[in-house]
Image (cartoon, rainbow, N blue to C red):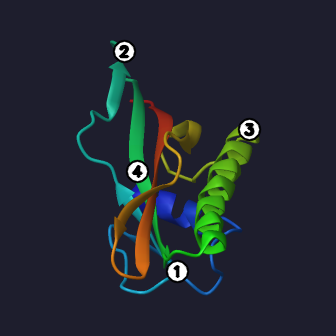
Amino acid sequence: MIESVQKYVEKCPYLDEFTSVNINYLVDKVKAYSVNEGVGYDPIISKDILGNMNCQFQFSFDAKFYWNDELENNVNNSKFFEHFRNWLEENNKNKIFPEIKGVTIESIGAITNGYLFATNSDEAIFRISCIMYYFKER
């Protein structure tokens, strides 16, 4: 599932075209991206007597950008996540979802805004938490 979400996120037009999206790993350079599997949630929302399941997949999307006291830089970092969130919303509206064999995706979207997750002297990791709902027939 995480690999399909990673391939989906790589299609976002706001990502740097020369940078790939990693899975559960953010390389130590600026303009790095990673899709990370969520923790601490039950993927199964409900199950019927036939074994069909309504499920969720929680993940975060991280990006490493320059971070400093320049207002324009920090506004641009925030705008990136605003654009990413809007891209997810537009895809959800148009039913453009990750391709995952054996499941029917019902929706995908952000459940938080992009936020400052970690910093060092001149770089920061920003994160946005997302969720995908899907149906899995037995």
Residue 12: image x %, image y %? 66, 64
Residue in view at x 63 percent, y 72 percent: 15
Q: Earlier in the sequence, mark 1 or mark 2?
A: 1
For the N terminus, which image quadrant?
A: bottom left
Q: Nearer the viewer, mark 4 or mark 2?
A: 4
- Dot 3 corresponds to which residue? 93
What's the mark number on residue 48?
A: 2
Q: Amino acid at mark 1?
A: Lys
Q: Amino acid at mark 3?
A: Lys
Q: Earlier in the sequence, mark 4 or mark 1?
A: 1
Is 13 on the left-hand or right-hand side of 18? right
Asked if the residues shown at circle 4 and circle 3 are in contact, with their CB atoms under 8 angstroms apart, the answer is no
- Dot 4 corresponds to which residue? 59
Q: Amino acid at mark 4?
A: Phe
SS at mark 1 in the image = loop
For the C terminus, which image quadrant?
A: top left
Q: Earlier in the sequence, mark 1 or mark 3?
A: 1
Residue 114: image x %, image y %? 52, 53
Residue in view at x 33 percent, y 77 percent: 120
Is 81 on the left-hand or right-hand side of 134? right
Residue 28 visible in the current orientation: yes
Q: Earlier in the sequence, mark 2 or mark 3?
A: 2
Q: Amino acid at mark 2?
A: Asp
